[in-house]
Image: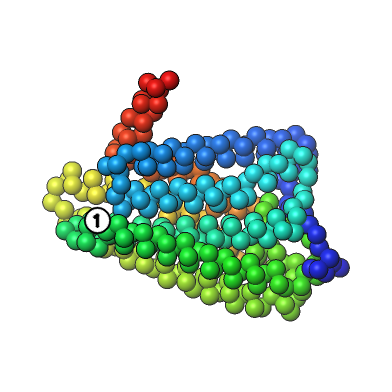
Amino acid sequence: MANSSSITHFLLLPFSGTRQLQLLHFCLFLAIYLAALLGNGLIITTIAWHHHLHTPMYFFLLKLAFLDLGAISTTVPKSIINSLRDSRDISYAGCVLQVFFFMFLIDAEYFLLTTMSYDRYVAICRPLHYETLLGSRVCLHMATAAWACGFLNALLHTANTFSLPLCQGNAVDQFFCEVPQILKLSCSTSYLRELWLLVASVCFASVCFVFIVVSYVQIFRAVLRIPSQQGRHKAFATCLPHLAVVSLFISTAFFAYLKPSSISSPSLDLGMSVLYSVVPPAVNPLIYSLRNQELKAALSKLITVCYQKQ
């Protein structure tokens, strides 16, 4: 039995016990990570480079790309290094930092996606008031609030989780340090305080989810009242990428955290964690760029300019 004061490192869950599969995991995660870096980096550069993209929608998309880069950089590089070195270790301090930054970035991303649904609601349902309701200062305040909420929530969970005595060893059943998996290592009567924080977070996340659903109900009602088919198509084209990203993020994260314990297993938990923590940052740039003609044109122009300079 280990005490939290004596733990100097944690052991992460490996994807496989065979060396060949570990190297396969290294190559796969490295490819996904590089794709995420490239895709989000291109979105950030394109939006920052083209002044006509300095609108509320692209302002929030820029922030989303930053959060995606941060979230995937918090977990994947350590997993890649461990697979390459055939290791499972992560230091105690590294685990604390990983929990804090991952929760901070994921929570901020969820709050930002909620804000982006309001942006789409105003753009389609109240277009005449768009510049008034979503001025540059308002957008900055909303983005700052999303980051601040994520920071506060992550700070509370991290401080509370690692203040609990750990009596069940130091083996974490996940490829990165995650709060529910750390709680499994705590003493049987000591984790109730953190569970209350988790319940409060789920309730707050549910409020955000209801806000997103209500926003899109209003959006779809407004779009269906547009007389021209071209107008409806254009309105849907601006909403579907955000709706796809929200659906992917919420469905995988909610199932990962709220699935019944009767169907829980290390392999299922591992697969679901990959779906909500690794896949979205890599595919979000693709989702947003496929149906956004304005962003595709700006990206093509940026690539052409860079090629000509060479």
Query: Is 255 positioned to the left or the right of 213 in the image?
Result: right
Question: Closest to the observer: 4 or 225?
Answer: 4
- Tell me residue 104's x, y (percent): 54, 60
Q: Quadrant for residue 190, please give it.
A: bottom right
- How many residues crowd around disc 1 within 10 Å: few (fewer than 14), some, or many (20 or more)? many
Residue at (40, 48) in percent of width and height: 62
Reply above or below: 290 against 9: above
Reply above or below: 81 against 210: above
Amino acid type of the residue that numbered disc 1 sits on in the rendered structure: Ala
- Tell me residue 68's x, y (percent): 50, 49
- Tell me residue 249's x, y (percent): 48, 54
Residue at (39, 68) in percent of width and height: 210
* Residue position for label 1: 123
Residue at (34, 48) in percent of width and height: 58
Residue 264 in view, yes or no: no
Reply above or below: 172 against 157: above
Residue 215 in view, yes or no: yes
Where disc 1 sits, the SS reads: helix
Q: Quadrant of the image for the C terminus?
A: top left
